Image (cartoon, rainbow, N blue to C red):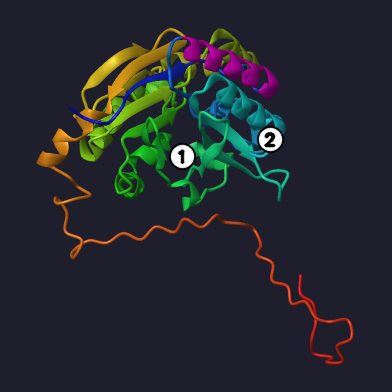
């Protein structure tokens, strides 16, 4: 009998209160409490849940979006701010782990943001903070590139938890970096929809098929369970965008909605699946099932050639400036000794 735990997990397939960080954080707190009451030990939220996913960057030219960029910046969160602290405190009160996607503001710049996520433990402590390595496609108009500091798998009593944001789940090196840390639960977060074309030009990216493929591939290679947590476009989000430009309706309505789902270590689906309706999806992960598939192919064990392949990952947190100070005595008579700062 396996000594590994059986874990109940939840994924919030829900809409942000569009561009309203306070209301969206309040919604997150309510959902954490609901999932905890239903026995969840881990609750995942979608990509950029707070304050919303900036889908307008796919709809209109950047010269038409300055006001939205300014509002998005104002509604984004500091990782050390009151909103994240409130969510962490709720996780501690409920005794659950929380994975939260949010747009992160920079203390060094009033206009710099990252597409970020935090993993909060069941005591209310942030145990990992990840910034998306490369903003995807039109996201580059909104977010800065992240770094490797968050490429961490966290050892917890409910398993070894890792995660990547949206298109990072297509990056084989980022995924391998997590596999090589013994990942058992992989959280992938996604937007509600991903417009890439106007309907008249051949249709949009199929979110559901692509995300299922990527999640299944990672779980199959890592021999880990997968949580696919996607956002949801509600009526208020659609109305906001269409009221701004009626032409957006065709693109929004012609873009497939993303689905929230779960996969097992063979890549097969399990648990709930939500797509066209808002709610919380649940699944049960028996981590003992991660072991047997390793006997067939263990890409971070015997089924690799470290003498042929090597990977180096820089997990330094990148900062805009690094200060170096040379402190001297006030009585120094050496004119060449100065303080740098």
Q: Quadrant of the C terminus?
A: bottom right
Which secondary structure, mark 1? helix
In the rendered image, residue 213, in percent from the top left (x then y), is placed at 26, 29
From the top left corner, tell me how far across and down residue 166 is, in percent. 42, 34
The quadrant where residue 198 appears: top left
Alpha-carbon span between mark 1 and mark 2 = 19 Å
**Vertical relation: 156 (above or below) 178:** above
Q: Position of residue 226 (x, y in %)?
A: 32, 28
The residue that label 2 is drawn on is 73
Drawn side of residue 155 relative to residue 84, left or right: left
Q: Which badge, 1 or 2, comes first in the chain's sequence?
A: 2
Q: Can residue 299 be seen from the camera position used here?
A: yes
The answer to whether 314 appears left or right of 79 in the picture is left
Q: Which mark is residue 137?
A: 1
- Residue 154 or 79: which is nearer the viewer? 154
Q: Which mark is residue 189?
A: none
Q: Which residue is the extreme one toward the bottom?
A: 334
Q: Which residues are magenta?
A: 20-37
- Relative to 296, 262 lies left or right: right
Residue at the location (84% across, 91% down)?
335
- Count the numbered circles shown: 2
Question: Residue at the spot x=50%, y=51% of the render?
Answer: 147
Q: Is residue 183 magenta?
A: no
Residue 250 in view (yes/no): no
Vertical comparison of 243 with 299: above or below: above
How dense is the environment of label 1, judged by Cα within 10 Å: few (below 14), some, or many (20 and up)? few
């Amino acid at each position: 009998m396996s000594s590994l735990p059986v874990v109940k997990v939840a994924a919030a397939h829900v809409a942000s209160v569009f561009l309203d960080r306070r209301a969206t954080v309040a919604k997150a707190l309510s959902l954490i409490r609901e999932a905890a009451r239903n026995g969840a030990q881990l609750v995942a939220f979608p990509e950029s849940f707070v304050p919303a996913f900036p889908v307008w960057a796919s709809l209109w030219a950047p010269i038409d979006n300055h006001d939205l960029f300014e509002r998005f910046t104002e509604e984004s969160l500091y990782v050390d701010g009151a909103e994240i602290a409130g969510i962490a405190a709720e996780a501690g009160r409920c005794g659950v782990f929380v994975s939260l996607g949010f747009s992160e503001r920079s203390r060094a710049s009033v206009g710099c943001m990252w597409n970020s996520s935090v993993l909060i433990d069941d005591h209310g402590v942030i145990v990992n903070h990840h910034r998306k390595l490369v903003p995807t496609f039109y996201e580059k108009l909104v977010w800065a590139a992240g770094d490797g500091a968050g490429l961490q798998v966290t050892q917890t009593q409910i398993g070894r938890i890792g995660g990547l944001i949206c298109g990072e789940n297509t990056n084989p090196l980022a995924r391998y970096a997590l596999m090589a840390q013994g990942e058992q639960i992989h959280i992938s977060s996604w937007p509600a929809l991903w417009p890439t074309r106007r309907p008249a030009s051949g249709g949009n990216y199929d979110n559901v098929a692509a995300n299922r493929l990527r999640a299944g591939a990672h779980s199959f290679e890592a021999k880990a369970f997968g949580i696919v947590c996607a956002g949801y476009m509600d009526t208020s989000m659609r109305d906001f965008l269409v009221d701004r430009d009626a032409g957006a309706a065709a693109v929004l309505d012609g873009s497939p909605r993303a689905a929230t789902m779960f996969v097992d270590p063979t890549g097969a689906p399990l648990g709930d699946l939500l797509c066209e309706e808002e709610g919380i999806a649940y699944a049960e992960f028996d981590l003992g099932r991660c072991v047997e598939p390793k006997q067939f192919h263990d890409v971070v064990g015997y089924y690799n050639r470290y003498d042929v392949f090597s990977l180096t990952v820089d997990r330094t947190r990148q900062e805009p400036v690094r200060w170096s100070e040379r402190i001297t005595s006030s009585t120094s008579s050496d004119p060449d000794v100065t303080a740098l700062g």
